[in-house]
Image (spheres, rainbow, N blue to C red):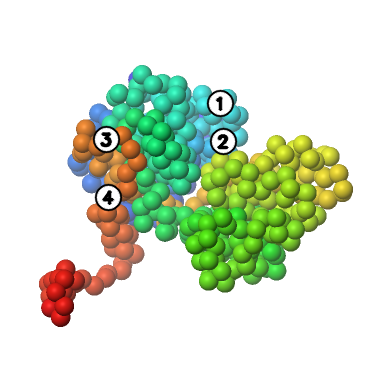
Amino acid sequence: MSPKSDIKDAGLAAAGKERIAWAGREMPVLKLIAERFEKEQPFKGVRIAACLHVTTETANLALTLKAGGADLILCGSNPLSTQDDAAAALDAYGIPTHAIKGEDDATYYKHIMSALEVQPQLTVDDGADLVTTLHTKRTELLSGVIGGTEETTTGVIRLQAMAADGALKYPIIAVNDAKTKHLFDNRYGTGQSTLDGITRATNVLWAGKKAVVVGYGWCGHGLALRASGMGSHVIVVEVDPVRALEAVMDGFAVMPMEDAARIGDIFVTVTGDKNVIDANDFAVMKNGAIMANSGHFNSEINIPALETMAAGKRTLKPYVEEYLMPDGRKLYLLGEGRLINLAAAEGHPASVMDMSFANQALGLEYLVKNRGQLSAGVYPVPADLDDNVAALKLTSLGVTIDTLTEEQKEYLSSWQEGT
């Protein structure tokens, strides 16, 4: 039996349902999948534990899995990303939910442990905290797990490390690496929602500012593009020579962090790594510099070092902390260094999450259909599933595309010259 929900206020359910329905308007692919799931019941009797950002978009995924017959429980994947009305609505829909916005670390991990009480056969993760907790705290449950899916770059990195060490005990599909996920969610979703979160927290004017984007993966691509579109002078910090060259070719300045730290006005980290803005950077930043993170964990900015270096600290307004440095400079940290697009705003637009969560739903169905046929490891989303999501999205947008003739197909598959 699933543990009862642990949410902030059940009275928020009505408002949550309205907002979930509003997000659902922009998620036609997931709706089509839900309609099929309701008829076919691919998850009938299957226990699913999901550790995701508890938002209105995630709620639509949860309802899709429930429509497919799943016995689902949900916990939050970030203490600041939970939308309490969405959590209340999910509880009202009969989906046990363990998430409260602003919960402390102890409560966060208690909620993960509660989700594991269902003895899941499938896991759905955003950052791999559920999977790593399962592999370290509830190892007796591993034999009953069919497989899982992972939503984020950070989570895939962790899972690949587990697999390399021989620690991963079941197959996991890297939803993040699907083309219909990272090319759209990471680039357009992160780009728009990160600027939205920073703007809501600070009301800063982007035009004319030197915006430092730390990391030029697909999230960095989107962030740099949106900041440039708002009139910022974008500086990219990278360690990968190919990505750095791409940033140069895209028209952005590229330099080491030690140089960018001296001239930047707004710094945003999107690397999935640790301490990419560090003590030596705080020491040379301009008075008034703003720092935010849009990577999964709050480890990208070395907050303990900042706390140690500062002569004082105060909270100016929600999600804005001012650090007074010994020389009189003031540095600003947004959202406690956590995902600023979910801490201070509403996260990715529903339209891009439609494709990401469609991959989650179809990936889980694939795991059930192929139960026992996959060994432990990290797997890509099958190409036909990825293409199916893209085709469904195009259909929902009213867009049609061309098809190859038989002659063209034969030509492309032939190796003989001139055929």
Name the spot of residue 52 as percent of width and height, x first. Answer: 45, 39
Which kind of residue does numbered mark 1 sit on? Thr
Which disc number belongs to residue 107?
1
In the picture, which quadrant includes the C terminus? bottom left
Report whether 198 appears left or right of 403: right
Q: Is residue 294 above or below residue 378?
A: below
Which kind of residue does numbered mark 2 sit on? Pro
Whether the residues at callouts 4 and 3 have beta carbons within 8 Å, the answer is no
Nearer-N-terminus badge (4/1)? 1
Nearer to us: label 1 or label 3: 3
The front one of 59 and 145 is 145
Q: Secondary structure at mark 4?
A: loop
Query: Residue 73 occupies which quadrant of the picture?
Result: top left
Nearer to us: label 4 or label 3: 3
Q: Which residue is mark 3?
A: 375
Q: Which residue is mark 2?
A: 79
Nearer to us: label 4 or label 1: 4
Whether the residues at callouts 2 and 1 have beta carbons within 8 Å, the answer is yes
Name the spot of residue 189 as percent of width and height, x first. Answer: 48, 56
